[in-house]
Image (cartoon, rainbow, N blue to C red):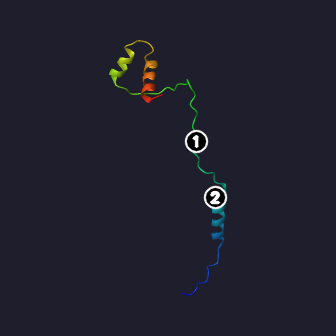
Amino acid sequence: MADQPRRPRTLADARTEAEAAFKKVTTKPVEAPPKKAAVPGVREQVTLRIDQDVLEHFQSEGPGWQERMNAALRKAAGL
């Protein structure tokens, strides 16, 4: 095949290239948000669905059932 003459660059081509180069230089890379450091002793309120018999077991021992449940979950998690 014979070499075909190059198509002359148009203003639109130059503009598109310039915009792409500008965007590449000015666009910030997407970064994951930093993980929050776990502060010992800070508790977070959550909603948790558990079986009724499990709840009754912890509540049957009286006040402090939430702390006992937290201790059991920590033990099960290996913490």
Dot 2 falls on a residue whose secondary structure is helix
1 horizontally vs 48: left or right = right
Single out the residue that lies furthest toward the front: 78
* Residue closest to the eye, 10 or 32: 32
Does residue 7 appear left or right of residue 74 in this picture? right
Residue 48: x percent and y percent? 42, 27
Q: Is residue 10 left or right of residue 58?
A: right
Q: Earlier in the sequence, mark 2 or mark 1?
A: 2
User: Residue 46: where, in percent of width, then height?
Assistant: 47, 27
Mark 1 surroundings: few (<14), some (14-19) or many (≥20) residues within 10 A? few
Q: Which of 76 and 11 lies nearest the eye of the viewer?
A: 76
> Residue 12, image x and y in percent?
63, 69
| Marks 2 and 1, how far apart at CA | 22 Å
Q: Specify the amino acid type for callout 1.
A: Pro
| Residue extending farthest top | 62
Q: Which residue is mark 1?
A: 33
Left or right, 50 with respect to 79, comes to: left
Counting from the top left corner in percent of width and height, residue 75 is at 44, 25
Residue 71, by quadrant, is: top left
The residue that label 2 is drawn on is 24
